[in-house]
Image (spheres, rainbow, N blue to C red):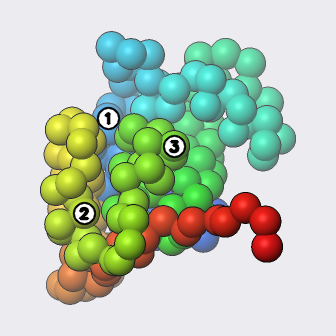
Amino acid sequence: MYRPLIEADAGRNGIDTAWVYGIIRQESAFIFDARSDVGALGLMQLMPQTGFITAREINLPITGDRDLIDVANNVDVGTHYLADVLLRARGEEPVATAAYNAGPTAAISWLPVRKPLPADIWIETIPYRQTRGYVKNVLAFTAIYDYLLNGRQDALVTRMKPIPPAVVVANGG
């Protein structure tokens, strides 16, 4: 469902198609006009403010909620935002997945302090129960879609690399 669109936008933004499918499955169960209780919209459940800001970054003329619910716009904006949170999460999909759900500031604050943590342990330390479950579900769905799309059976293992500690920047020099 929506495969050409998802593959094109994931490819354009340099992110894994199976991961996008996993996010969409968790966020909206592929209901294109889904609206959450908190106001998130469309397949990728974009918060309007995030959607409008991201759309401006990619020069996509979004003027209201109806434009954000449009499947092509929603996936275009959502994959761009997902690529942005992946960059902020230094390429760590579990961290970026948590950031997509709880916000980048929260997810980055949960990074280990001194030494890497196995990804499964890091996920269990996420203080928000809803986000912890969200990350588990997205990773499981991503592994399923990776198998369906690419025939990969080791997808979950390859996504569960140790989560490196936060980078501490010292003042002065």
Q: Secondary structure at mark 3?
A: helix
Between residues 82 and 126, which one lies in front from this camera angle? 126
Residue 75 in view, yes or no? no
Q: Residue furthest right?
A: 59
Q: Amino acid at mark 3?
A: Thr
Residue at the image point whose x is 74% and y is 18% from the top: 63
Residue at the image point whose x is 79% and y is 35% from the top: 56
Residue at the image point whose x is 69% and y is 28% from the top: 52
How far apart in space, not on screen, are marks 1 and 3 (Cα)? 23 Å
- Label 2 vs 3, first from the N-terminus: 3
Tag 2 and tag 3, C-beta contact below 8 Å: no
**Crowd class of label 3 (few under 14; some 14 to 19; many from 20; radius 10 Å):** few
Q: Secondary structure at mark 2?
A: helix
Q: Position of residue 137 (x, y in %)?
A: 19, 52
Residue 22 in view, yes or no? yes
Is 110 on the left or on the right of 25, as rendered?
right
Tag 2 and tag 1, C-beta contact below 8 Å: no
Residue 98 is labelled as none
Q: Amino acid at mark 2?
A: Trp
**Crowd class of label 2 (few under 14; some 14 to 19; many from 20; radius 10 Å):** many
How far apart in space, not on screen, are marks 2 and 1 (Cα)? 25 Å
Name the image quarter holding residue 156: bottom left
Residue 105 is labelled as 3
Q: Position of residue 75 (x, y in %)?
A: 54, 45
Tag 1 and tag 3, C-beta contact below 8 Å: no
Residue 28 is labelled as 1
Residue at the image point whose x is 58% and y is 59% from the top: 88
Q: Amino acid at mark 1?
A: Ser
